[in-house]
Image (tube, rainbow, N blue to C red):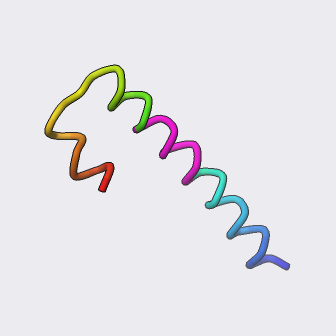
Amino acid sequence: MYRAETMTYWGDKFLFWQWSFSFIFLAYPSPIIDPIML
């Protein structure tokens, strides 16, 4: 159960950061962000 909760927690964090990076990439296109998106 602890592992499942941890995976869900990190899954939410990953989706949040992915959305944040996508927003930044769309708002400020930069070659520095390209490696992060990959």
Which residue is painted at 49% across and 44% down in the image? 17
Magenta span: helix, strand or loop, mainly?
Answer: helix
Which of 29 and 13 lies nearest the eye of the viewer?
Answer: 29
Q: Pinpoint residue 22: horizontal percent, then vertical percent.
A: 42, 36
Magenta stretch: includes residue 12 = no
In the rendered structure, the answer to whether residue 7 lies left or right of residue 20 reads right
Q: Quadrant of the N terminus?
A: bottom right
Most extreme residue toward the right, as rendered?
1
Q: Quadrant of residue 33?
A: top left
Q: Is residue 20 found inside the magenta-colored segment of the image? A: yes
Q: Residue at x 37, y 28 (%)?
A: 24
Magenta region: which residues? 14-21
Write the residue at 62% across / 60% down: 10
x, y (%) of residue 20? 47, 35
* Towards the viewer: 1 or 38: 38
The vertical placement of 34 against 2, above or below, is: above
Q: How many marks?
A: 0
Image x and y of residue 37, in percent: 32, 49
For this orientation, the residue located farthest to the left is 31
Location of residue 5 (image quadrant): bottom right
Q: Quadrant of the C terminus?
A: bottom left
4 in relation to 15, above or below: below
Residue located 27% across and 22% down the image: 28
Q: Position of residue 21 (x, y in %)?
A: 40, 38
